[in-house]
Image (cartoon, rainbow, N blue to C red):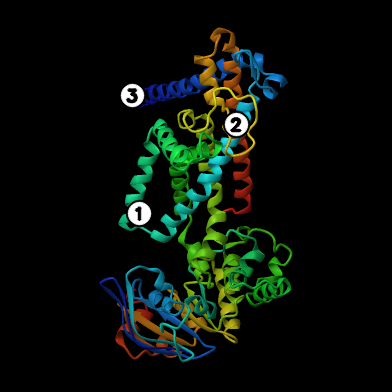
């Protein structure tokens, strides 16, 4: 379960997230929607502390994963990032073989057992619905794959270190419609084992894949609720205007 | 004049300039090959100079130059690459980085004779290395350090941040990210810097003048504390101060040719390793 309580976030002087409180249940898909610059990606990156990499940022309030405050001093950031995987907007495989891409997270975490690594690589590729397509060319460069395959490889790479949460930052926005639908099917599958938070610009996609939807605007969480309700009968006027495409 | 004519004139002008550059290069090379090829044989490559350097060969100088290339790279490559990594990956873009960058650029612009004097004062005398391969290699190493730092920085700058983000997001630390992702990608470009440095090191005379080069030393070094002969200095010696300069003239051209061939071979070797490394880690 992921929870935030009164979270504020600042880039230098810019107040990017304003008093956000939200609660996302385990093994659900939560979609975050909203116009560009509304803070939804910043909010997503709170949970694996990728915002820490940017200079001069500040966070206040509480960010809890399974009840643990992930911004507490005792939390090791690299351990957190193993538990909270991330898939980026543009597929970003490493310039290594398919096998080594998936094994990377294990290797940097000092896993040396070869058979265990091989086992995890296969399981992760299967979970990402890529195994059948790549099982005969694991030693080939990851760049030989298509964009959609590369993105599923990045998902497999994230799964290999056994996270419980998967953050997805517009994972299909750089892909063609067929690859996109494969990613969406995959999300539906992964929901059985992982808590998924997905940022998307594509409203139909949010409606198709998510259980809950949060609508952000200008750093505020305007509305959060069941996806069906957000898209059919939202409580707020702003939400209605956005999801019906009256502004964007 | 209409556009077409203007264009034709301009292109002809550029083409002539281009041909001029290539022509000069070919002329120099051809001149040296023409004059030098006559003395090149197995004896020239494998024996020491004799009879006031008007006979014999350049073997000790070849060995000396190879020692200096290897030594200066052993000094400058690790230090330069690590400095480049530190500047780009750890310091980011603070004011101190700009200061360091200006300093390294200035270091690259210092005349090599100044490095020679500095090397003599520091390595030969203060550190007590004496006239030795060690002192020469350190001096040449300092000379090429700015180049290697700069190319390392540029190579790292060319790597998209998405690689770094992808690595951190899997729980990798900075060091792992650098050694497992960034360096393999950057290496082909860093090798380019190395290629340029090798050319520089093998041709420099001033920095080795006071630190390592021997006028005449017909034996091979036993270790890094020995002096050696080196091709560029040997060339200078036979061209200016032999006992019979006219008689040793062909030897001078032969030496120049050997030096050029060594530089070409080193470049080929480095280019091959660049291609090999580049194939292993292709960026999209």
How busy is the neighbourhood of tag 1: few (under 14 within 10 Å), some, or many (20 plus)? some
Asked whether the viewer can see residue B59, the reply is yes
The quadrant in which the C terminus of chain B is found is: bottom right
Question: Is disc 1 on the same chain as disc 3?
Answer: yes
If you read the primary sequence from the N terminus, does the residue marked by circle 3 or circle 2 appear first? Answer: 3
How busy is the neighbourhood of tag 3: few (under 14 within 10 Å), some, or many (20 plus)? few
Task: Check disc 2 and report its element: helix, strand or loop.
Answer: helix
Give the label on residue B71, or none: none
Q: Nearer the viewer, mark 3 or mark 2?
A: 2
Task: Check disc 1 and report its element: helix, strand or loop.
Answer: helix
Give the label on residue B64, or none: 2
Nearest the camera: A236 or B13? B13
A167 to the left or right of A152: left
Label 3 to label 2: alpha-carbon separation: 60 Å
Q: Locate residue B53: give its quadrant.
A: top right
Residue where numbered disc 3 is placed = B2
Q: Chain of mark 1?
A: B
Q: Are marks 1 and 2 in contact (CB under 8 Å)?
A: no
Against A174, residue B38 (above or below) is above
A136 to the left or right of A27: right
Residue where numbered disc 1 is placed = B97
């Amino acid at each position: 379960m992921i929870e935030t309580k009164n979270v504020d976030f600042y880039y230098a002087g810019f107040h990017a997230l304003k008093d956000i409180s939200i609660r996302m249940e385990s093994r659900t898909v939560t979609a975050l929607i909203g116009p560009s610059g509304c803070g939804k990606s910043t909010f997503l990156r709170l949970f694996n502390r990728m915002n820490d990499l940017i200079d001069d940022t500040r966070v206040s309030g509480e960010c809890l994963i399974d009840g643990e405050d992930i911004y507490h001093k005792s939390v090791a950031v690299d351990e957190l990032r193993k538990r909270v995987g991330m898939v980026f907007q543009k597929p970003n495989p490493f310039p290594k073989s398919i096998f080594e891409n998936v094994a990377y997270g294990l290797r940097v975490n000092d896993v040396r057992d070869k058979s265990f690594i091989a086992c995890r690589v296969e399981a992760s590729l299967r979970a990402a619905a890529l195994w059948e397509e790549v099982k005969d060319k694991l030693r080939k460069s990851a760049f030989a794959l298509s964009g959609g395959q590369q993105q599923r490889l990045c998902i497999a790479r994230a799964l290999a270190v056994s996270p419980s949460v998967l953050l997805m930052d517009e994972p299909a926005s750089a892909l063609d419609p067929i690859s996109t639908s494969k990613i969406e099917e995959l999300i539906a599958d992964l929901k059985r084992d992982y808590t998924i938070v997905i940022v998307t610009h594509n409203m139909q996609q949010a409606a198709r894949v998510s259980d809950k939807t949060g609508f952000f605007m200008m750093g505020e969480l305007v509305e959060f609720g069941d996806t069906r309700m957000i898209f059919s009968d939202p409580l707020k006027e702003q939400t209605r205007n956005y999801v019906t495409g009256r502004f964007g | 004049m209409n556009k077409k004519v203007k264009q034709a004139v301009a292109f002809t002008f550029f083409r002539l300039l281009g041909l001029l550059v290539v022509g000069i290069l070919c002329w120099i090379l051809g001149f040296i090959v023409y004059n030098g090829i006559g003395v090149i044989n197995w004896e020239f490559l494998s024996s020491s100079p004799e009879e006031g350097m008007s006979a014999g060969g350049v073997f000790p100088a070849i060995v000396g130059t190879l020692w200096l290339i290897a030594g200066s790279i052993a000094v400058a490559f690790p230090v330069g690459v690590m400095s480049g990594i530190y500047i780009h990956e750890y310091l980011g873009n603070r004011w101190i980085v700009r200061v360091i960058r200006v300093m390294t650029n200035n270091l690259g612009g210092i005349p090599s004779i100044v490095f020679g004097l500095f090397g003599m004062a520091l390595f030969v005398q203060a550190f007590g290395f004496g006239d030795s391969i060690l002192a020469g290699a350190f001096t040449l190493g300092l000379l090429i350090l700015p180049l290697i730092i700069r190319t390392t920085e540029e190579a790292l700058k060319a790597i998209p941040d998405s690689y770094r983000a992808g690595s951190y997001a899997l729980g990798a630390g900075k060091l792992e990210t650098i050694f497992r992702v960034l360096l393999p990608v950057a290496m082909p470009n860093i090798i380019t810097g190395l290629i340029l440095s090798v050319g520089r090191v093998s041709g420099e005379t001033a920095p080795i003048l006071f630190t390592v080069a021997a006028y005449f030393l017909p034996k091979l070094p036993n270790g890094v504390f020995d002096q050696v002969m080196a091709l560029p200095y040997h060339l200078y010696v036979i061209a200016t101060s032999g006992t019979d300069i006219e008689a040793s003239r062909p030897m001078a051209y032969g030496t120049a040719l050997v030096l050029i061939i060594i530089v070409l071979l080193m470049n080929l070797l480095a280019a091959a390793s660049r291609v090999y490394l580049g194939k292993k880690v292709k960026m999209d």
